[in-house]
Image (cartoon, rainbow, N blue to C red):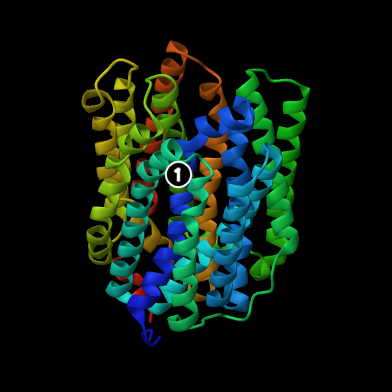
């Protein structure tokens, strides 16, 4: 595969595009208390401020990646950015919670299109060790963008109001579209038809499960409505798997990809680790604002060591993974993350930031810096180029689905108050530690077959 004509500008466009989704997630978490107060939202409705975005993002990432493989990755990248930007403006202008949730859902659709095509475009433009370095840079700068999000969002919420956080996306999106149209080469496979039945089944499954889990956790009761939702979600999952099996190579999630033990292991690892991370990143700023008296800006700054540490180390880890393979960076990194989650039990309403919040955030940052780039590199190495967009979309979907499920369950913590809120958060942190430890064991047991520079050697 020839090198891209403008590799650095291609990398810049992909970073700017994916940063939209990274910034949005981190900014919105810090703004939740302000949104709830302004729009008179209940704890369950606050969860939907996050889930309305994560649901279409999780459900449509697969078809977003497959559409790029089929119609053209640059074309879908630009469409996704434009849709995300228009939806961001609609969020800022929303007059009530219903309008905000609808705009958040539209943001999720745009992100589901831009994210997998950002990564697949990058995978097409680079090969071998250069691919590992590029992906490491992509993950690192994305993490730094996520680091900027919480303090910037907190400052905007305190100084202007929560609506301002959505306007931040507009200049970033404009730059991404300009560079993509002018400098990024088009790439596609043009072979795989779109899988609309599979996408519909996945959307129904995630929607039913998320709705049921949100009701269950926020109301602390398992009733008939919750049971019906869970049952419908599980049936839709079975239907989705049946559709994908019968479509074979035409499926948006080809079952054959799971013939690789490494790809199956990466899927489980991603779900466990990013589910735990998504839950903690949602709950920590909420707890600091509601129980410890932090302002939105202070809560945003409190999270800074986590994504900033990830960003500074990800490029180095991308180069290292290209040489040693992903197994040990993922195994050791996930285990370190588990230790960081466990340290969050030190968080207390009256304790100093440096002795309660900072230790856990720092250790999580160290662990995740060993995970982000190796995980992305390993996913692309586990499949052939024909399914690059599909595989990256699927892995991103699994990560967002883990966060979606965690957010739905987090209502049990959000609905608490005072000392009960702190205690509930401690329980959530320990659950996150157990999930991260399980993801470490998964990496150790399943990733031995991916070798250094495997993708390069196949060319």
The reply to whether residue 42 is visible in this rendering is yes
Q: Quadrant of the C terminus?
A: bottom left
- For image coordinates 62% across by 76% down, the residue present is 70
- For image coordinates 48% across by 57% down, the residue present is 169
To which residue does mark 1 refer? 27
- For disc 1, the neighbor class at 10 Å (few under 14, some 14 to 19, many from 20) is many
Q: Quadrant of the N terminus?
A: bottom left
Q: Nearer the viewer, residue 289 or 191?
A: 289
How far across and down, in percent of the image, does residue 268 sit? 48, 47
The mark total stands at 1
In the image as oriented, which residue stretches furthest toward the front? 160
How far across and down, in percent of the image, does residue 102 sit? 68, 47
- Identify the image quadrant of residue 37: top right
Q: Nearer the viewer, residue 106 or 434?
A: 106
Q: Is residue 82 above or below residue 220?
A: below
How far across and down, in percent of the image, does residue 237 sit? 69, 46
The reply to whether residue 448 is visible in this rendering is no
- For image coordinates 60% across by 69% down, the residue present is 79
Q: Is residue 281 left or right of residue 301?
A: right
Q: Nearer the viewer, residue 13 or 247?
A: 13
Label 1 secondary element: helix
- For image coordinates 50% across by 60% down, the residue present is 170
Q: Is residue 367 left or right of residue 65?
A: left
How far across and down, in percent of the image, does residue 434 sit? 39, 31
């Amino acid at each position: 595969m020839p090198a891209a004509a403008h590799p650095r500008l291609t990398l810049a466009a992909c970073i700017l595009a994916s940063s939209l989704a990274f910034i949005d997630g981190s900014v919105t978490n810090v703004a939740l208390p302000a949104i709830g107060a302004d729009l008179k939202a209940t704890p369950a409705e606050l969860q939907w401020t996050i889930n309305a975005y994560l649901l279409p993002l999780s459900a449509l990432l697969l078809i977003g990646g497959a559409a790029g493989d089929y119609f053209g990755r640059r074309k879908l990248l630009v469409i996704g950015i434009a849709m995300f930007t228009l939806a961001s403006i609609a969020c800022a202008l929303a007059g009530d919670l219903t309008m905000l949730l609808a705009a958040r859902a539209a943001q999720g659709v745009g992100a589901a299109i831009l994210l997998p095509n950002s990564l697949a475009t990058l995978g097409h433009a680079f090969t071998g060790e250069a691919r590992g370095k590029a992906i490491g840079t992509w993950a690192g700068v994305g993490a730094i963008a996520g680091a900027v999000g919480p303090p910037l969002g907190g400052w905007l919420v305190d100084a202007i109001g929560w609506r301002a956080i959505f306007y931040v996306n507009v200049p970033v999106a404009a730059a991404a579209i300009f560079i993509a149209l002018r400098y990024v080469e088009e790439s596609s496979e043009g072979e795989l038809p779109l899988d609309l039945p599979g996408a519909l089944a996945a959307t129904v499954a995630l929607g039913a499960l998320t709705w049921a889990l949100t009701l269950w956790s926020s109301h602390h009761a398992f009733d008939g409505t919750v049971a019906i939702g869970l049952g419908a979600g599980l049936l839709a999952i079975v239907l989705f798997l049946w559709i994908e099996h019968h479509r074979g190579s035409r499926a948006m999630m080809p079952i054959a990809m799971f013939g690789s033990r490494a790809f199956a292991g990466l899927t489980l690892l991603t779900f466990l680790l990013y589910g735990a991370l998504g839950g903690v990143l949602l709950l920590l700023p909420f707890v600091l604002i509601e129980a410890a008296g932090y302002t939105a800006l202070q809560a945003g700054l409190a999270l800074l060591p986590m994504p900033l540490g990830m960003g500074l180390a990800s490029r180095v880890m991308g180069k290292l993974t290209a040489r040693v393979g992903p197994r040990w960076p993922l195994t050791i990194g996930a285990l370190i993350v588990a230790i960081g989650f466990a340290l969050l039990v030190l968080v207390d309403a009256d304790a100093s930031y440096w002795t309660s919040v900072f230790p856990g955030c720092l250790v999580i940052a160290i662990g995740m810096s060993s995970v982000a780039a190796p995980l992305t590199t390993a996913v692309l190495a586990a499949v052939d180029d024909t399914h690059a967009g599909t595989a990256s979309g699927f892995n991103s979907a699994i990560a967002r689905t883990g966060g979606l499920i965690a957010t739905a369950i987090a209502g049990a913590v959000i609905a608490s108050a005072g000392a009960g809120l702190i205690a509930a958060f401690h329980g959530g942190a320990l659950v996150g530690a157990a999930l991260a430890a399980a993801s470490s064991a998964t990496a150790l047991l399943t990733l031995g077959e991916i070798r250094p520079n495997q993708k390069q050697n196949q060319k």
